Image (cartoon, rainbow, N blue to C red):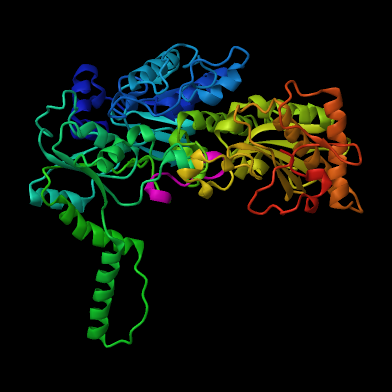
Amino acid sequence: RNMRACQQSPRAAVLAVLSATCFAAAVEQKRSFVILGAGPAGIQWGKLLEEAGESDYVILERNTAAGSFFQKSPRAQKLISANRANMKHDKSSEFGLRHDWHSLLASKSFATGRYSARWHPTAPELVKYLQDVADPLKIEYNTSVVRTEYREKDGLHAVHTEAGDVWLAEWLVVATGMRVRDVPECLSQHAKAAGVSLYTYDTYPNVVTADEEFCRGKTVVVFGGGNAAFETADIISPCAAALLLAHKHTPRFSYLTHYVGDVRISNAGILDRYQLKSLDYLFPTYWRHDAEKAFTKSQAARRRVSGKEQQTITPSEEWYDRFFNCTHYRVILEGKDVAIFAGGFTGERAGVVNVTGTGQRFPDVGPFWSDPAAPRRYFAGNLMHGADYRRSAGGFIHGFRYSIRAQVRHILRQRSGGKAWPATLFATVDEALQHGVSRVQEASGLYQMQDFLVDVVKLHANGSATYFPELPLPWIEEEIADMGTGGALVIKFVFSNKEQWTHELNFNLSRVGQNPALFIHPVIASLWRGQPLDECHVTEDLAGSWQTTEPLTDLWFCLFLAAARVSDAHRSSPREEIDVEATALQQLDARMALYPPPAPTRVGVRRDNANLVTPQKRTDTSTAPSSPAAVPERVRVEL
């Protein structure tokens, strides 16, 4: 077996001359944990294992250093992740992680460690940080994995390397990251036939002086509609005579979608160049109307030949792709000198990761990002993102660092045979709610992984409550066995009604103060026996801290209301909804009397006839009653 590996790999053969491994038996080494990849995800796994006192692990990295992906990508060597290096002195390090998108958990800080003061750091600055954090970890470099297998005979995972060695693992973590997509075969064929020089995102020559031979004075087409394509267009444009960005789908921009993976304005210089008639332009790669006409004509011809009656047939997406590949690549390449395929990334790696689903980027995952095809095999890093794609930030360092922490907690509990999720038991519900307030004000995991990682407050019949932090929403019952009994609160962050955001809305004050809030804000959900009772949306806070009068009052009201709804559901003869709200308002009044908010705002609260403090409950103006009298006294809007 080793001999075959050496014959197939020149690199292994060279190593063999020095070590004679090709002529020895395969080396097998066993570890409790084997982690594939020393990128941010693999390093994060190693750091959390070290923090938990687990030392029987190894990280296998095919390159010579940690963080090697960022040595080549992004091509401009400028990151699009945020780095607010100068927080106010009264802010905690936990709050700072809400705006530090590079630091790993249980590690030194990227922002306060002064690796960069730039809002968008450079890739070399991140590589330096990753290598510093990785330095004390147990990493085997120059170890390329060719395949993995699960062995039924001993219940171990066998990781086969290019050199012929085998690493055995009780638990296998695949954190191999993303790679550039392969060039479509049809594009290669048409480019070759047209004499067009074809490159990929990671193979086109560096542009330093804008006088490089491959692009100087050439007409260039860039295929793609994401950040890689837009970034490439900005890099190549100064060197080219003209440039076309050919996109298959309409590009989406992060400032409208709130999704960090969509096109960033910092990469969208081609929009200026196009609108200011500077010989760069954008164009869809195929015209759906033309494709539909061609499909209709082909189907009509088939019906004439077969003699069947006419019927309505809807073209499939696969058919559109075939039509596009076979026709419009050729059309778009006409008159071009250079083509660059920048169609994004995929997690697929032969023998290691199979991808399915949305865009063929991510593997299927089970609870806590496990591999459904093999026991004790897990995916980490941006391979996790299929579970929260376009919903949260799990494909990026500032998101998956928290997903990995949840994953490590789950696996260590499984491994120990009963070690509980790190939870806190409070003697009273009020104490648990106070803890929830501090989490909303400070916790970075809830904030960064909005609508996916949540806090759960399990309410007990004796008046106590258990607080579970940062559970993945789809798999809560994996960690809280009695979630289907009794009552609970779920605390999370969300953006509401994302589809309402337009370019114009960013400059219109109507976006502020809607109910529910459009900007990121906390939501408190109440559940009884695992079933939802209600959700209360807290007002947004542009300061992101929920510490001043209005947002803090609203937060407490939602917490009290959710707890009152659970209490009401527990009663044998439930009270009416208005009594539940009254209970919450009474608790709020008592709370605010004892602990007034630190800083009043111009927009206050009102007292109704029952002399209860009432938080201002904003109403969506599109559905608000025209007369103030039509609004119940308790929730009347006051500006």
Q: Residue furthest front?
A: 627
How many labels were placed on the picture?
0
Seen in the picture, residue 437 relative to 311 is either above or below; the reply is: above
Q: Is residue 359 magenta?
A: yes
Judge whether 517 appears above or below 187 on screen. above
Question: Is 595 drawn above or below residue 270 in the view shown?
Answer: above
Tell me: 84 left or right of 514. Answer: left
In-front residue for pair 365/76: 76
Q: In this view of the protein, can residue 52 be seen by the observer?
A: no
Nearest the eye: 69 or 624: 624
**In the rendered image, which quarter contains the C terminus?**
top right
State which quadrant residue 556 falls in.
Answer: top right
Q: Position of residue 309 (x, y in %)?
A: 33, 87
Write down the region rendered in magenta: 358-370
Query: Residue visible at 28% across and 43% down?
Result: 275
Relative to 256, is 192 on the left or the right? left
304 to the left or right of 129: left
- Give the quadrant of the N terminus: top left
Q: Is residue 331 magenta?
A: no
